[in-house]
Image (cartoon, grey):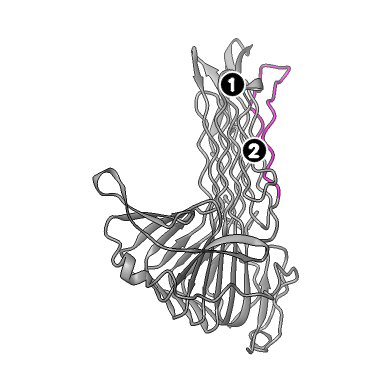
């Protein structure tokens, strides 16, 4: 295979001319991510049958549980409509429930949430045409649990990490009241940390706020951002819950946000994501502070990996953005007030998209931005193959010039 190996990271990248980009073996970027794959996924044996014959137009279909193969219909309160067979495989020292389809034609009206314990693996031995919508929740880290009134320091729970590293940390409490500037004022609990991805840690939350004119400040400690997960196929870690609060005789606490999931899609043919196609492995947004609680951290984005012996093209939307931490403004002071940043949750990190194919052609949108919607804590796109069009990649404005 004639290949252009292009690794794109959020570090400062080298500007590369279009002429250099057309040469096989040229490398874009000063900081490679991941590196070329030395082992492609297993080849489909067709044992799961035809995707299109089973899922069709997707009428009433809402969930696919990759642990069991059960496909749920939303009618009549929800029930299992059919079960797709799978095989347990090992790949890159990870265990998968592999779905071995003959074809994988996903019609525009198919809208599924893919969930399960392990990363999802979809294999086909024909060209893949994807026009539907998949929300990838398989292998996603859950957000930190909300504190209870018995929780020590009213600390929010830490987010979970699929890789077993630290997820977004929970913010500490408690909130309380003080007298400053001639009136009773309140200080807040702290924000939870953002979840991580396989490339970046999440952002830390914001410490608890304290009235500027009250003196002797008490600042509850914010949750740390989640630790970077190993560079394998993992979902993003969950965001930390904000610190809890007792306010006006009632107790308030909110959970952290879930991370995005992980999926690998592979075929002996080509992969086409059409203009209506959406594959979303983004982290969820954190909850905004209320009643003097801390806001919760956003979830880290997951991973989307694609392997094709032929071409890869995208004219749809591939989302792997970090979840935004809960954000608010806080009015502080009595006789003279100031508007300051609230006890915000940290933003989740952007995810990792990987493509191994003969050619790469993006005319749609790929979003690997961090939870703030920028390149801060954004993810990466790693391509092994000849790049025809870079297209729009949100969060990677630093990529060098491309044809």
Q: Please state, as top left, top right, bottom left or bottom right, where the N terminus lies in the image.
A: bottom right
The answer to which of marks 2 and 1 sits earlier in the sequence is 2
Secondary structure of the residue carrying numbered label 2: loop
Where residue 71 appears, as percent x and y from the top left, is 37, 56
Q: Please state, as top left, top right, bottom left or bottom right, where the C terminus lies in the image.
A: bottom right
Report the residue at 60% width, 28% height from top: 243
**Is residue 108 at least partly visible in the picture?**
no
- Side of 189 relative to 275 (left or right): right
Is residue 258 magenta-colored? no
Secondary structure of the magenta portion, mostly? loop
Q: Which residues are magenta?
A: 205-227
- The residue that mark 2 highlights is 205
Report the residue at 65% width, 83% height from top: 4
Q: Farthest residue in the right direction?
A: 30
- The residue that mark 1 highlights is 336
Disc 2 crowd rating (10 Å Cα; few below 14, some 14-19, many 20+) is: many
Secondary structure of the residue carrying numbered label 1: loop
Where residue 129 appears, as percent x and y from the top left, is 40, 75
- Side of 239 relative to 99 (left or right): right
Report the residue at 68% width, 47% height from top: 164
């Amino acid at each position: 295979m004639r290949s252009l190996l292009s690794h794109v990271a959020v570090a400062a990248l080298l500007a590369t001319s279009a002429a250099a980009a057309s040469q096989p073996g040229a490398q874009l970027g000063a900081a490679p991510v991941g590196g070329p794959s030395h082992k492609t996924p297993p080849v489909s044996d067709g044992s799961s049958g035809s995707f299109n014959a089973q899922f069709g137009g997707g009428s009433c279909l809402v969930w696919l549980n990759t642990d069991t193969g059960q496909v749920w219909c939303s009618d009549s309160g929800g029930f299992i409509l059919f079960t797709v067979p799978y095989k347990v495989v090992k790949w890159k020292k990870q265990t998968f429930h592999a779905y071995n389809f003959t074809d994988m034609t996903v019609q525009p009206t198919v809208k599924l949430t893919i969930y399960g314990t392990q990363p999802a693996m979809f294999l086909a031995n024909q060209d893949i045409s994807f026009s539907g919508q998949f929300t990838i929740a398989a292998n996603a880290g859950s957000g930190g649990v909300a504190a209870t009134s018995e929780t020590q320091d009213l600390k929010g729970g830490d987010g979970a990490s699929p890789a077993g590293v630290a997820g977004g940390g929970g913010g500490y409490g408690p909130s309380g009241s003080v007298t400053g500037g001639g009136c009773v004022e309140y200080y807040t609990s702290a924000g939870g940390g953002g979840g991580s991805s396989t490339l970046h840690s999440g952002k830390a939350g914001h410490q608890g706020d304290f009235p500027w004119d009250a003196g002797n400040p008490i600042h509850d400690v914010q949750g740390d951002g989640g630790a970077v997960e190993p560079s394998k196929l993992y979902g993003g870690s969950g965001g930390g819950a904000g610190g809890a609060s007792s306010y006006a005789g009632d107790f308030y606490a909110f959970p952290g946000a879930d991370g995005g999931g992980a999926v690998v899609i592979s075929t002996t043919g080509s992969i086409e994501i059409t203009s209506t196609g959406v594959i979303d492995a983004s982290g969820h947004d954190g909850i905004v502070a209320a009643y003097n609680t801390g806001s919760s951290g956003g979830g880290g984005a997951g991973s989307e990996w694609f392997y094709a012996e032929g071409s890869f093209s995208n004219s749809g939307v591939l989302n792997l953005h970090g979840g935004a931490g809960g954000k608010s403004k806080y009015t502080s002071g009595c006789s003279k007030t100031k508007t300051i940043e609230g006890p915000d949750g940290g933003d989740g990190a952007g995810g990792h998209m990987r493509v191994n194919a003969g050619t790469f052609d993006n005319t749609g949108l790929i979003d690997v931005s961090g939870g703030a919607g920028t390149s801060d804590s954004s993810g990466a796109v790693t391509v092994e193959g000849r790049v025809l069009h870079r297209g729009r990649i949100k969060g990677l404005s630093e990529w060098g010039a491309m044809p």
